[in-house]
Image (cartoon, helix red, strand yellow):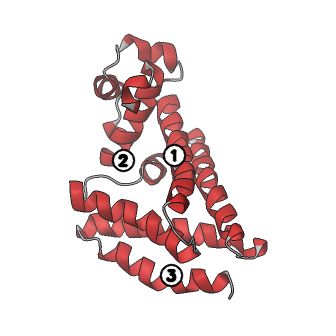
Amino acid sequence: MAEARRGPRERMVFSAAQLIRRGGVAAAGMREVAAHADAPRGSLQHYFPGGKEQLVNEAVEWAGRYAGKRVARFLAGLEHPTPRGLFAAMAAQWTEEYAADGFAAGCPVAAATVDCAASGESTREAAATAFATWRRPVAEALADMGVPASRADALATLMISTLEGAILMARAERDVRPLTTVVAELGPLLDAAAGP
């Protein structure tokens, strides 16, 4: 339903993010994006005069905003929000996806970082912005749950970097064990940071 309300530009950014998360930046060629988005190829030049680099960067930034917005949805789904509960909800998104669809997809921000960070400054900056956009609401949520402000950003970084590593390992092993392990091991540390 939401897909139908998106204009061609938004569909292309979304499609690029979906292709990147499944096959890396190489999978997000301009023709592939246009086909996936059901958009005319000529519109790519109109909406993305900077070419594929601009499209990839916008897809990465979109993914950071999407992840940041998910934090509020995760919190809304928790009867009694705790740092452990938030982290478990973040990981559950991936364990549920992998159980339903297999291990073909990962995080588009991580994929673009691996593929392009050394070759393109603008993509590295887009990835850094995306991670910061995701980290900010996680840190705010932790502070709201009683984690001292001086630790909230560091713990948000720990949560996201741990989750990203577990996603990579889960895909490599074709097993959700890394995701369930990090939740079990990191959860008590996160809750302890919130105090009694």
Q: Residue at x 31, y 52 (%)?
A: 105
Q: Is residue 66 above or below residue 77?
A: above
Q: Residues within 10 Å of mark 3 (few under 14, many from 20)?
A: some
Q: Is residue 178 above or below residue 123?
A: below
Q: Amino acid at mark 2?
A: Arg
Q: Is residue 186 left or right of residue 36?
A: right
What residue is shown with label 2? 21
Query: First in sequence: mark 1 or mark 3?
Result: 1
Q: Amino acid at mark 1?
A: Tyr
Determine which quarter of the picture holds residue 193.
bottom right
What residue is shown with label 1? 66
Does residue 162 appear in this view? no
Q: Residues within 10 Å of mark 2 (few under 14, many from 20)?
A: many
What residue is shown with label 3? 186
Q: Residues within 10 Å of mark 1 (few under 14, many from 20)?
A: some
Q: Which label number is shown at residue 164?
A: none
Q: Looking at the image, how many numbered discs can be counted on the residues?
A: 3
Q: Is residue 3 above or below residue 70?
A: above
Determine which quarter of the picture holds residue 2.
top left
Which image quadrant: the N terminus?
top left
Kind of element beneath mark 1? helix
Q: Residue at x 45, y 20 (%)?
A: 7
